[in-house]
Image (cartoon, rainbow, N blue to C red):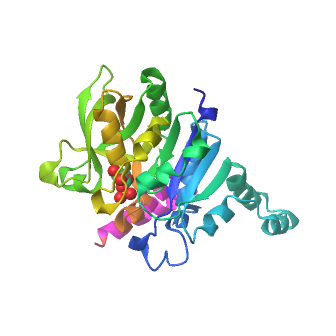
Amino acid sequence: MEPAKIKAVMPVAGLGTRFLPATKATPKEMLPVVDKPAIQYVVEEAVAAGIRDVLMIIGRNKNAIANHFDAMPELEGKLTEKGDDRKLGHVQHSSSLADIHMLRQGEPKGLGHAVFRAKSHVGDSPFAVMLGDDLIDERDPLLPKMIEVNEQKKAMVIALMEVDPEQISMYGCASVEATDDPDVVKILDLVEKPAKEEAPSNLAIIGRYLLTPEIFDVLEHTQPGKGNEIQLTDALKEVATDDDNVDVYGVIFRGRRYDTGDKLDYIKAILQLASDREDLGPDLRPWIKDFAATL
Ligand code: G1P
């Protein structure tokens, strides 16, 4: 399947309570990571993998996201008058990236429910689910490998990352079997946010999934699980453990990932990305060193 035919689904209906009061009136996906809203990195990642159609599953209070990916004639007119092509380019870039569609989730019943809402938009093709809290560094592409595994195995594919066992209770966790490819594993079982004593491995699901439409048949009857929410992990567990269903494979990601869903990690993400930038890094890096010496 050509990437251009694959659609991306981005669930962005969360309330972002961890970032209050910043997220009282601003969606957490719009918080800037250096100088771009977090969600723009995720859309750019989809576009870099050849995806041109993005469906955002939104909640109330998310108008700023729709506005960000829309044209802004008044601002564009002002910048054109001033001849500020650089800023004009920045403004126009986000609205020309992809076709962005918005769908309200309705009731906030969990990630599985949000994905289920994408059913009629997605149709009969494999599609990517991309969570806005996980930023994947553009220098370490992950989606192309997932698309390749989906095509080869005709299976669903999830992204996994080795984490410190102390952290596994923050993630979905996979029990796996090796394949000939050291970066690809077969998923035997999954559990959402297990206690560290009960975790079958230290392989955590990170927020990238390449699913096939069979997931909707399962999500339709998936009961609320952890946190009384309909969990995507529970639906994938059913797919992986049911012999009649397609297989689920995992791609182990060993590149740079930034978590913007947590305050401390969000600050780290900004520093890491800014220190790598040509326009900011040369001044920022020595400052970080001096600052660290004062601690
Ligand atoms: C979700 C998934 C979880 C996954 C995580 C990745 O959890 O339910 O399985 O490991 O995303 O970021 P959330 O972080 O939305 O609670």
Is 232 in front, or is 68?
A: 232
Q: Residue at x 77, y 64 (%)?
A: 72
Give the answer, above or below, for where 177 lies relative to 35.
above
Within the displayed image, which quadrant is ligand 1 positioned in? bottom left
Q: Is residue 20 left or right of residue 228?
A: right
Range shown magenta? 270-293
Residue 211 in view in this figure: yes
Is 126 in front, or is 203?
A: 126
Q: Is residue 288 left or right of residue 78?
A: left
Q: Is residue 284 one of those drawn in magenta?
A: yes
Q: Is residue 89 left or right of residue 138?
A: right
Q: Position of residue 166 (x, y in %)?
A: 18, 55
Give the answer, above or below, for where 211 lies relative to 166.
above
Q: Quadrant of residue 74?
A: bottom right
Q: Position of residue 191 (x, y in %)?
A: 25, 47
Q: Residue at x 71, y 55 (%)?
A: 95
Q: Is residue 107 one of those drawn in magenta?
A: no
Q: Position of residue 189 (x, y in %)?
A: 25, 38
Residue 142 in view in this figure: no
Q: How many marks?
A: 0
Task: Give the farthest residue toward the left.
Answer: 197
Q: Residue at x 37, y 64 (%)?
A: 262
Q: Main secondary structure of the magenta part?
A: helix
Q: Quadrant of residue 45?
A: top right
Split into 4 quadrants, where in the image is the N terminus?
Answer: top right
Split into 4 quadrants, where in the image is the C terminus?
Answer: bottom left
Q: Is residue 124 left or right of residue 261?
A: right
Q: Position of residue 134 (x, y in %)?
A: 43, 53
Task: Give the farthest residue toward the front.
Answer: 221
